Each structure stands twice: as C-alpha cells, then as structure tokens.
Image: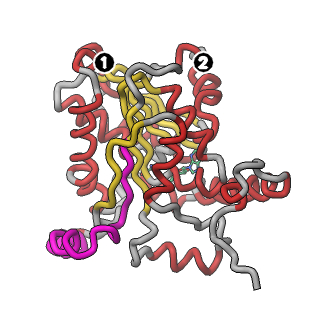
Amino acid sequence: MPIRSEKPNSIQSSEGGPSSSDHSQNLQIADRFLQEYSSDNAVRKYSRSTAGAGIEYLLENDYGAIYKSVFDRYVPEAVKKTGLNLLEFGCGAGMNLIYLVTLLDKMGIRVGHAVGTDFSETLIATANLEAESYLPPDLRSKVKFCVARNESLIDDLHGQLGIGKEELRGSFHLVIGVNTIRYSHRLGNVRECVQDIYCLLSGGCACVVIDMNKGFPFFRSRVRDRLNKSAEERYLPSLDEYASPFVDAGFEVVRKSHFSWVPHSASPRLLKVIRAFTPVLDKVAPTHAMRCLVVSRKPALSVL
Ligand SMILES: C[S@@+](CC[C@H](N)C(=O)[O-])C[C@H]1O[C@@H](n2cnc3c(N)ncnc32)[C@H](O)[C@@H]1O
C-alpha cells in the first residue's frame, strides 16, 4: 500500500508545477480558508479586546523582543529618522501592526507608513475599526489596511493603494507575517509570496515570519482539524521548510528558532501557569515550543 505524505501536492510536484486538478483543488481550499476568516468567530479571535490575555502578553514580551531586536539590527539609522515603512501581510484584524506602530512611536522611531494586508474583507474592515480605537490621530493617519492576497502582494497593493509597481519595489523597511505563511505552504504558492516580499523590501532590511511549530504537541486546533479538514488544509511546515523559500528567493536567513509556549487565547490564569513553566520547558524541550521564527535579511546590494 503506498504511503501518503501529508505534504500538499503542489509542494511535492514543484518541479513540474501544480497540475490543473491541483489548481482547482487549491482554489477550493483557498475559498474554505477565506470563509473561515470571514466569520464572526474570526473577528472575535483576532480583535484585541476579545482575543485573550495571551496575545497581549506575546506582543509585549515574546514578539515584542523579536521586533525590537530587528529594529536594532536591520533598520538603518537614517530610516529611523526619516520614517520607517512597515508591511504586515496576512494581518487579520491588525493586532501586530497596531502594536508595532505604537511601539515604534514609543521608541522614538519615526513611522513613514504602515500597511496591513489580508484577503478577508471582514478582517480588514475590523482592522480599520481597531486602528480608530487604539491609535492616536497622528499615528492613525499613517496606517492603511487593504485587501490583498499573500500570493499576489505587489499586484494587489498596486491595485488597492494606486501606487505604481516600480514605486512599491524596495519601498518597505520591515515586513512581518504572523501565523499566516503556513497558508501559502498549504496552497503551494509560498514562493510567489516570498518573491514579492523580496521585491518590496529595501536592501539590508528584514522580514519576520512567525508561525505554528509542527513539533508542539498540544495544539487544540490540530485535534479539531483532523476531524474535518484534509491533510492539505491542515499541513504544517517544519522550521526548515518555513526558512527554505526565503533562501531560494535570495534572502540570508539570520535567525531561525522555535520559541514561546503561550497560546494567543490564553486566559490570565493559564498565562500565569505557562509563564511559571517556561524556563523549564525551554530547557528540556526547546524544539517543541509553540512557534517557529524565521528572520530573513535581504542583502544590502541586491538586484530588485
Ligand atoms: C491565524 S490568522 C493570523 C492573523 C494575524 N496575523 C494575527 O496574528 O493576529 C491567519 C490570517 O491569514 C490570513 N490569510 C490566510 N491566507 C491568506 C492569503 N492567501 N492571503 C492573504 N491573507 C491570508 C487570514 O485571513 C488570517 O487573517
């Protein structure tokens, strides 16, 4: 009996490209993802006031520390004065982007403009409302959320913002994607996503990708998904697989690790317990932490 790999077809057969049946299957899967992220449940899960104590903690601590170290190392000093342009792809209701804009401001780093993209119109509309509630007018005016797919970022940003594609190239100083790039792996279009990120970034600047670690044994969603999702729809890349499209696109992967044990939706009580156990867990089972991190830098002297 043949052994079936869980890897999506379009990844397995990358040399010849996906067949037309893979293509129509992927379109159906993408539609199901979009439905999931257009629901009231998604709005609750990804809006700051209803998301849970876990995400507040992560933004201030685990994610915040990563973002700060990336500002320090990969944002040129001149840009910190003239204005840093930030892109978050697959931003959902914008929790990371809104947090980052506030953090940059607190750190005295000038924000040029910050753009959040997502394919869910519902979440983009929610992100705009969240920005109204959480950002003071001077920062709000620098933030735009727009509908764009991870696999066609340049085309969609051009269409939505009315900025020329040539002008978009090299115009961002930091790109982040949190819990979204696994969908591009599942649909077999991660290369398109990463190539566009490469073109959008200015030389010497970095992209931060954070996503689920397949080695974390306790994801409740994995148990639930086994019951009602195909192997393609619930596929999780390994840390090396998260990093590999960045290497292929010409990035230098400068940081690659497993980290953090805190679920986004953790209650204050669960958060307290996890924080107490984190030092031990980090010591005994570091590769089983909840998330993967890949930080990739575009070489300073690179052809766009
Ligand atoms: C798990 S949520 C994470 C949202 C947000 N980054 C956060 O951390 O709060 C995954 C996000 O990826 C978006 N997404 C999935 N596939 C996408 C695609 N092909 N293009 C754009 N966005 C996509 C979903 O709409 C959803 O907002």
N-term-proximal mark, 2 vs 1: 1
Q: Does the magenta stretch include residue 154?
A: no
Taking depth in this image into account, of 58 and 245 the one nearest to the observer is: 245
CA distance separating discs 2 and 1: 20 Å
Kind of residue sitting beneath label 2: Lys
Q: Is residue 302 above or below residue 185?
A: above
Q: What element carries label 2?
A: helix
Which disc is residue 192 wearing? none
Q: Within 10 Å of the Cα at label 2, are there few (<14), some (14-19), or many (20+) other Cα atoms?
A: some
Q: Is residue 55 above or below residue 83?
A: below
Q: Using the rendered image of the protein, determine whether residue 125 is visible from the camera's viewpoint.
A: no
Q: Check the image and name the residue furthest to the bottom.
A: 1
Which residue: 64% across, 24% down? 159
Q: Using the rendered image of the protein, determine whether residue 60 is visible from the camera's viewpoint.
A: yes
Taking depth in this image into account, of 52 and 116 the one nearest to the observer is: 116
Kind of residue sitting beneath label 1: Gly
* Residue 51 in which image quadrant: bottom left
Q: Write down the residue under mark 2.
A: 165
Q: Write down the residue under mark 1.
A: 83
Q: In this view, does 8 lie above or below 216?
A: above
What x and y, as percent, mark residue 99? Answer: 30, 41
The reply, left or right, for residue 102 in relation to residue 174 is left
Q: Is residue 72 above or below residue 256?
A: above
Q: What stretch is highlighted in magenta?
A: 269-295
Q: Check the image and name the residue furthest to the right.
A: 20
Which residue: 43% across, 56% down? 211
The N terminus: image quadrant: bottom right
What x and y, as percent, mark residue 283? Answer: 19, 71
Please identify the dominant SS of the magenta region. helix
What x and y, as percent, mark residue 295? Answer: 36, 43
* Residue 195 in which image quadrant: top right
